[in-house]
Amino acid sequence: MDDSRPIFVQIAEQIENDIISGQLAEETQVPSTNEFAAFYRINPATALKGVSLLVDAGILYKKRGIGMFVADGARERLVTQRRDEFQADYIRPLVAEAAKLGIGSAQLAEMIRKEENQ
């Protein structure tokens, strides 16, 4: 866990990461809030708050009396959301800075290829 962000946000992000990576497939059950609480040594209410973020976003859903499950289409929605955030947080500022420095798209692409090969 990272101390700079609330624990419940980190739990939600960990579940999202597990869905994106395929560790949690759609329609599979996620660990219970008590399991999260025991694993991370936190209050179950904190774990519930993280899970509830994903329920509210439609990523998880509850089967009464059974637990929380990954919703159909959750991975695709998360990947789309993260790509949009990546573009807004990294690509737009990168392109803006490159323009200030007179770096064209071809040169920028070449710089990225060099970084990939390192």
Image (spheres, rainbow, N blue to C red):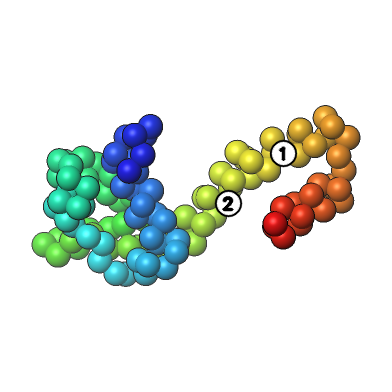
Q: Position of residue 114 (x, y in %)?
A: 77, 55
Bin the neighbour count of mark 1 within 10 Å (Cα to Cα): few under 14, some 14-19, many 20 and up. Answer: some
Residue drawn 17% across the image and 45% down it: 41
Residue drawn 59% across the image and 46% down it: 86
Q: Which residue is mark 1?
A: 94
The CA distance from mark 2 to mark 1 is: 15 Å
Does residue 82 appear left or right of residue 66 in this picture?
Answer: right
Q: Quadrant of the C terminus?
A: bottom right
Tell me the amino acid under the disc marked 2. Answer: Arg
The mark that comes first in sequence, 2 or 1, is 2
Q: Position of residue 50 (x, y in %)?
A: 28, 44
Residue lying furthest left in this view? 65
Q: Which residue is mark 2?
A: 83
Can residue 31 be seen here? The reply is yes
Q: Are marks 2 and 1 in contact (CB under 8 Å)?
A: no
Q: Residue 53: which numbered mark, if any?
A: none
Tell me the amino acid under the disc marked 1. Answer: Leu
Does residue 17 appear left or right of residue 117 in this picture?
Answer: left
| Nearest-to-viewer mark from 2 and 1 | 1
Q: Secondary structure at mark 2?
A: helix
Nearer-the-camera pick, 72 or 75 = 75
Q: Position of residue 90 (x, y in %)?
A: 64, 41
Can residue 56 be seen here? The reply is no
Residue drawn 24% across the image and 41% down it: 49
Bin the neighbour count of mark 2 within 10 Å (Cα to Cα): few under 14, some 14-19, many 20 and up. Answer: few
Q: Position of residue 105 (x, y in %)?
A: 84, 47
Q: Secondary structure at mark 1?
A: helix
Nearer-the-camera pick, 52 or 93 = 93
